[in-house]
Amino acid sequence: MVEQTPLLHNILVVVLCVLGVCGLLCMIRVVGNRRYTDRLIAMNLVGSLVVLMICLLSYILGEGYLVDVAFMYGLLNLLAVAVLCRIVVTHHRERKENRK
């Protein structure tokens, strides 16, 4: 592991804060949008940002087990988005059939 200098530590904390702000902006996009596809994309982005934030936190704290937590959260994020995409596609198909 690379030695953390105070400058590197401060830079990583700033990057972590910026990622947190980006995550909050994406959550606003999830809540405030009407289209399902935009919500799904924003939700997937929030999950990816959380995984990145956990990895950075793991490096800052020097705790290796947090990488495992990030890995599992990434897999759950992938599964959730895949299931929700399937639900949206099914709903769209049913709606299209009902119009005919």
Image (spheres, helix red, strand yellow):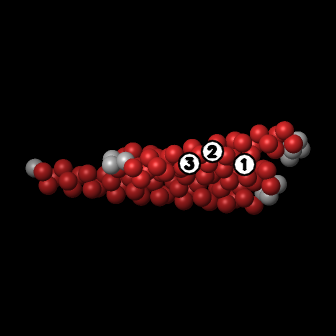
Mark 3 to mark 2: distance in Å? Answer: 6 Å
In the visual, does 41 lie left or right of 17? Answer: left
Q: Disc 1 vs disc 3: which is toward the camera?
A: 3
Q: Residue 19 carries which label?
A: 2
Q: Indicate the quadrant where residue 75 lies.
A: bottom right
Q: Do the residues labelled 3 and 2 touch (CB within 8 Å)?
A: yes
Question: Badge 3, how many Cα within 10 Å: few under 14, some, many 20+?
Answer: many
Q: What element carries label 2?
A: helix
- Residue 75 visible? The answer is yes
Q: Residue 39: where, in percent of width, then height?
A: 41, 49
- Observer-nearest residue: 66 or 46? 46
Q: What element carries label 1?
A: helix
Amino acid at pointer 2? Leu
Q: Residue 77: where, in percent of width, then height?
A: 53, 56
Residue at image position (77%, 39%) is 11
Q: Are marks 1 and 3 in contact (CB under 8 Å)?
A: no
Residue behind mark 1: 56
Q: Disc 2 vs disc 1: which is toward the camera?
A: 2
In the visual, does 98 lie left or right of 24? Answer: left
Residue behind mark 3: 23
- Observer-nearest residue: 11 or 53? 11
Q: Residue 14: where, in percent of width, then height?
A: 72, 42
Q: Residue 83: where, in percent of width, then height?
A: 42, 58
Amino acid at pointer 1? Leu
Mark 1 to mark 3: distance in Å? Answer: 15 Å
